[in-house]
Amino acid sequence: MPAPRECSLTEFLDLLRESLARDACWGVVLSQPCRGGTFADCPSKLTVRPIELSGSRCFQLAERRGKQEFHQNLAADELLIRITSEFGERFEQADLFTPDADYSARVIRQGVARVTCRKPSKSAPALTHDRGKQYLIPEGRPCPFLAEIGVMTPSGQVKAAKQAKFRQVNRFLEFVDDVLPELPPNRLIRVIDFGCGKSYLTFAMHYLLTKLRGREVEIIGLDLKAEVVADCQRIAEKLDCRGLRFEVGDIAGYAAVGPVDLSVSLHACDTATDAALAQAVRWKAKVILAVPCCQHEVFGLLTDDSLPGLLRHGILKERFAALATDALRAALLEAISYRTQVVEFIDLEHTPKNLLLRAIRSDQPLANVFERYEQLKQQLGLRDFALERLLQTELVALARNRGHV
């Protein structure tokens, strides 16, 4: 490895210029903000990577400010101007990565840097802007509702602190898009969203169904907090979200007007999920999407002696109870003619509540499902649980139809 040498900042910038000219710039990092500088708003780091947009190479510049990161796409000449203005003025350290070598430059006095040349450490970068993931709402394309709720900038860039929420929105839209063929094809689609909260996903559903799929909808977001409902309604009116409205309402007591095609409940706590599922079943909703949360009831019903090697550990009992609760819900929904899947919502790195129940109503009774549900209860040592009690009338009718009563 050659020994470090001193050179002018201009000489180092010439290396950058030359690498840009032959498409050999695989990345740039500016770090170490200058001490005693006068730039109070100076970012702590600038990171550059090459990307491809519309068939042309450009560079994405990520600017780190505290816990936030802001992105900007620049052409090669714009990048050179930006780095020239920043290195030596705002930042003391610059690293340039090329296929031939890595260059590190450290400012040691005005206009002079000490440059170290090392073997190349980076492989050829993937140039696709979204790194292979095709989102229903792509980054870089302005989306009014995401900008209004603070996930995107008006220009379409996803805020660093909202990357997980952006992925969650798109993952949820994939589930909704998958069940769209199960919903009525020739009329308005009616949706009830229980416990909508700040309504990230409610607005996302509206955007998917109306803007991306061209459907007419009536979507009602319900929540107990009047101030949250008022804010969501304000946003809906500001964005002219036709067919979307928000109401103060309780899951258990809400009376829908007309048929419900899609019932959604996301992170309803404990037995509130059971109340939402029961309402959806009574309405004969064609599709049910539910992300359960805080499954406390079954935790209290499980006896430690049923599985002593597992349930004597509190944290294991808590996790087992959550899985058992969702298994019971899925089995019971199948018993009343819903084809049900338990699927991963989003990666565990984003939230520990990452399971989604997806249930689609079937016109034909499913074979042997009630027996499997009863067997699961027996294995867990349970007589019943919240969803069964809430659907007792429907279950008695079902048993009568099958000749069990």
Image (tube, helix red, strand yellow):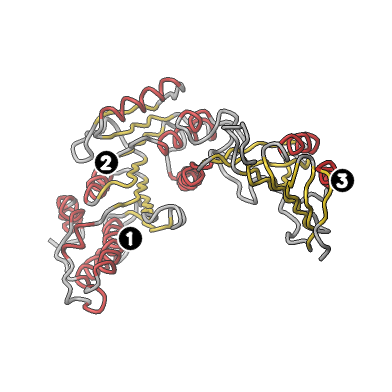
Viewer-proximal residue, 275 or 237? 237
Viewer-proximal residue, 240 or 49? 49
- Residue 138 position in % (x across, y down): 59, 40
Q: CA distance from mark 1 to mark 2?
A: 19 Å
Look at the picture and state if 182 lies above or below 84: below
- Residue bearing mark 3: 18
- Residue bearing mark 2: 283
Density class for disc 1 (Cα within 10 Å; few <14, some 14-19, many ≥20) is: some
* Amino acid on which the number 3 mark rests in the picture: Glu
Look at the picture and state if 319 lies above or below 271: below
Density class for disc 3 (Cα within 10 Å; few <14, some 14-19, many ≥20) is: few
Name the quarter where the C terminus is drawn.
bottom left
Marks 1,2: beta carbons within 8 A: no
- Residue 360 position in % (x across, y down): 37, 50
Q: CA distance from mark 3 to mark 2?
A: 67 Å
User: Residue 309 occupies which quadrant of the picture?
Assistant: bottom left
- Residue 8 position in % (x across, y down): 83, 44
* Amino acid on which the number 2 mark rests in the picture: Trp
Q: Secondary structure at mark 2?
A: loop
Identified at 38% across, 29% down, the residue is: 218
- Residue bearing mark 1: 366
Look at the picture and state if 386 lies above or below 16: below
Comes first in the chain, label 1 or label 2: 2
In this view of the protein, can residue 147 be seen by the observer?
A: yes
Q: CA distance from mark 1 to mark 3?
A: 68 Å
Marks 1,3: beta carbons within 8 A: no
Comes first in the chain, label 3 or label 2: 3
